[in-house]
């Protein structure tokens, strides 16, 4: 059985080898071409999941900075009107982060993202409860208590 290949003329041997090589190349090409659709779909998901949320998260970061700065200003406010002004700004920043978070939630698709988002929401809401307590103390003129509360 092995002798049939040895007994073949050289042109047939070359033909068999090149035919096998061609078959492997065609199979590789077909598999690669069919995988292009998956690569394109995954590319769309990657772009959608990594780049689209970035502006929203950058905006939330700016809102957090606004909250931080206005907390400092609330502590340093000398009149009740100033305290009300800064407390109102803090609350408006909080409300804006709630709006951005609701928009961001609609982009969450995967389970791991959902878990991270829920964890972020829980910690954000807990910190906002703490902020409300801080605002109440600072608005009542108890700046020292509010300052100590922040440092805990």
Image (cartoon, grey):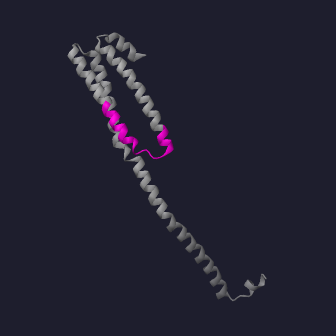
Position of residue 118 relative to residue 13, above or below, is above
Q: Taken as a whole, is the magenta stretch helix, strand or loop?
A: helix
Q: Residue at x 34, y 33 (%)?
A: 97
Give the x, y percent position of residue 120. 44, 33
In the image: residue 4, left or right of residue 23: right
The residue shown at (31%, 31%) is 95
The residue closer to the viewer here, 109 or 3, is 109
Quarter occupied by the C terminus? top left
Q: Which image quarter: residue 151?
A: top left
Could you say where residue 81 lies in the image, as x and y percent from the top left? 20, 17
> On the image, which quarter does residue 9 sit in?
bottom right
- The segment highlighted magenta reads 95-115
**Quadrant of the snapshot with the N terminus:** bottom right
Task: Look at the image and tell me whether residue 53 can be seen.
Answer: yes
Residue closest to the eye, 19 or 114: 114
Q: Is residue 127 left or right of residue 111?
A: left
**Which residue is more in the foreground, 76 or 137?**
137
Q: Quadrant of residue 68?
A: top left
At horizontal 47% and vertical 41% (from top left) the residue drawn is 114
| Near-viewer residue (109 or 79) | 109
Q: Residue 132 location, x and y as percent?
A: 35, 21
Judge whether residue 57 can be spotted in this image.
Answer: no
> Number of numbered discs present?
0
Q: Is residue 103 magenta?
A: yes
Q: From the viewer's perspective, tell me whether residue 16 is left or right of residue 103.
A: right
Q: Residue at x 38, y 17 (%)?
A: 150
């Amino acid at each position: 059985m092995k002798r049939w290949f040895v007994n073949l003329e050289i042109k047939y041997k070359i033909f068999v080898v090149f035919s096998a090589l061609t078959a492997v190349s065609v199979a590789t090409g077909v598999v690669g071409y069919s995988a292009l659709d998956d690569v394109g779909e995954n590319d769309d998901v990657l772009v959608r999941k990594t780049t689209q949320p970035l502006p929203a998260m950058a905006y939330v970061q700016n809102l957090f900075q606004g909250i931080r700065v206005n907390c400092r200003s609330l502590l340093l406010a000398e009149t009740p009107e100033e305290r009300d002004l800064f407390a109102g700004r803090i609350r408006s920043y909080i409300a804006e982060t709630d709006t951005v978070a609701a928009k961001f939630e609609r982009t969450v698709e995967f389970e791991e993202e959902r878990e991270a988002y829920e964890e972020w929401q829980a910690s954000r809401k807990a910190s906002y409860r703490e902020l409300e307590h801080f605002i109440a103390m600072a608005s009542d003129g108890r700046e020292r208590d509010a300052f100590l509360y922040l440092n805990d």
